[in-house]
Image (spheres, helix red, strand yellow):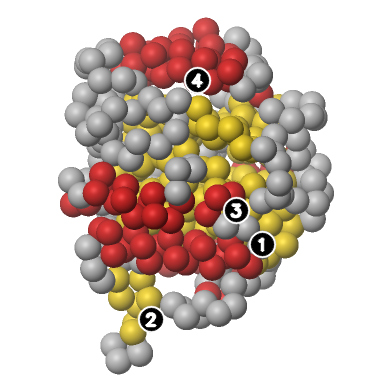
Amino acid sequence: MASRTILYPDPFPYADYRRYTYAMGIATGDLVWVAGHLADEYDPELGRMVCRGDLADQTRLALEKVRLVLESAGAGFGDIVHQVDYITPSAVEAYSETLELRRELFGHELPATTTVVANRLLRNECLIEVEVVAVRGPSSRRSFSTSRRPGQGIPAPSAVAKGGVLFITVSAPEGIGKGDVAAQARAIYETIGSVLQEAGAAPSDIVRTIDYIAPAGLADYRETARVRKDFFGEEFPTSTGIIVEGLLGPEALLEVSAIAVTGEGERSAYNPGWPWYEQVTFRPGVGKGGVLCLSGLTGADPISRSVASDDLAGQTRQVYQQAETILAEAGLSMKNVVKTVDYIVPRALPDYRDTVAVRREFFGDDYPVSTGVIINRLLRPEYLIEIDFTAVYD
């Protein structure tokens, strides 16, 4: 994997991004990682950042920011393979109306699109935040059949492959597993298995899954572990589980996003000797083909599973210490991290600025791209934050 290059889009008229503790974008070889972008811009008369307009206006501005970052890496919208749209509950009804805009910008090569209904975004007036991963260069691109039906949001491909990586995002079709999260999980993994087979890949090529869980599916969520075991055997990927405000399908309880590395390279799993991970259906770190993903990490001690700190900065520091340990197990350091996603519970939002000092402590001035989003809750009530990390090998 080529060394990472931090992207500095110029011009970037919306804000002075150099004062933030994250990068706007990072390029590593053919991969381009772009931070989550809100539709906000600096208003000199008010002296602060503002977010204006309806969902279509805000989507256009967020994607314009993404375009500027991509262009600084010699890439464009046609290179985007995966897009995550974090939207607020008030934006759900109008979300499908943004399809015309997307076709204007992307043509018919829409990326695999994961839609996360957040509790809110970091700026209260913002309706959408967009993060993307792109693969630049001439390598061929393949899209796989749509799993969503009308009424479930953007009819984007359920998977896109390019340059040895495959991004998949699947929810259960309408009418499948009503009220049964395990049944929906089984349908989801059947679809993922079909995509992998069509792409010439296998479950062992998956390095990360993210489970987006509707509140109604939380009580029986543990039952999905058997589905994962049946699908992955013992070659589990990393995983992050997030409770969202809801999913776009009216009966949907679960949506799964997955990253598979289909190119050359051995798959390696990393565990610094933490026994708990031998009892669950995911691993602390899994790498293949130059990419290393970590499971979502919380403020729980990796041995005792107790949460020692009840403040956000303390839990964030515990998260970063765990990440540092897993990376070291793989022969890497925090300088190899290209992306973080912070999932914050609503009661922790007033203290979120306290995490800036923790990022500076662990990253110095060499920041990865980052997205911060407020979600419904985490899997344990004492958790204030969960962070997942993506790193690349030198």
Residue 14 in the image: above or below residue 210 = below
The circle drawn on residue 104 is none
Name the residue at 23% across, 68% down: 53
The circle drawn on residue 42 is 2
Mark 2 vs mark 4, CA separation in Å: 42 Å
Identified by mark 4, the residue type is Ile
- How far across and how far down the image is residue 60, in percent? 36, 62
- How far across and how far down the image is residue 181, in percent? 31, 17
Name the residue at 53% across, 32% down: 143
Please tell me which residue lies in front, 25 or 326: 25
Mark 4 vs mark 1, CA separation in Å: 31 Å
Name the residue at 52% across, 15% down: 194
Identified by mark 1, the residue type is Gly
List the residue tagged with mark 3: 33
The circle drawn on residue 192 is 4
Name the residue at 27% across, 13% down: 177
Is 75 on the left or on the right of 156, as rendered? Answer: right
Q: Can see residue 360? A: yes
The local crowd at label 3, few if under 14, some if 14 to 19, many if 20 or more residues have their Cα within 10 Å, is many
Looking at marks 2 and 4 on the same chain, the residue that comes earlier in the sequence is marked by 2
Mark 4 or 1: in front is 1
Secondary structure type for disc 1: loop
Secondary structure type for disc 3: strand
Mark 2 vs mark 1, CA separation in Å: 26 Å
Secondary structure type for disc 4: helix
Is 353 on the left or on the right of 245, as rendered? Answer: right
Q: Quadrant of residue 233?
A: top right
Looking at marks 4 and 1 on the same chain, the residue that comes earlier in the sequence is marked by 1
The circle drawn on residue 74 is 1
Q: Can see residue 286? A: no
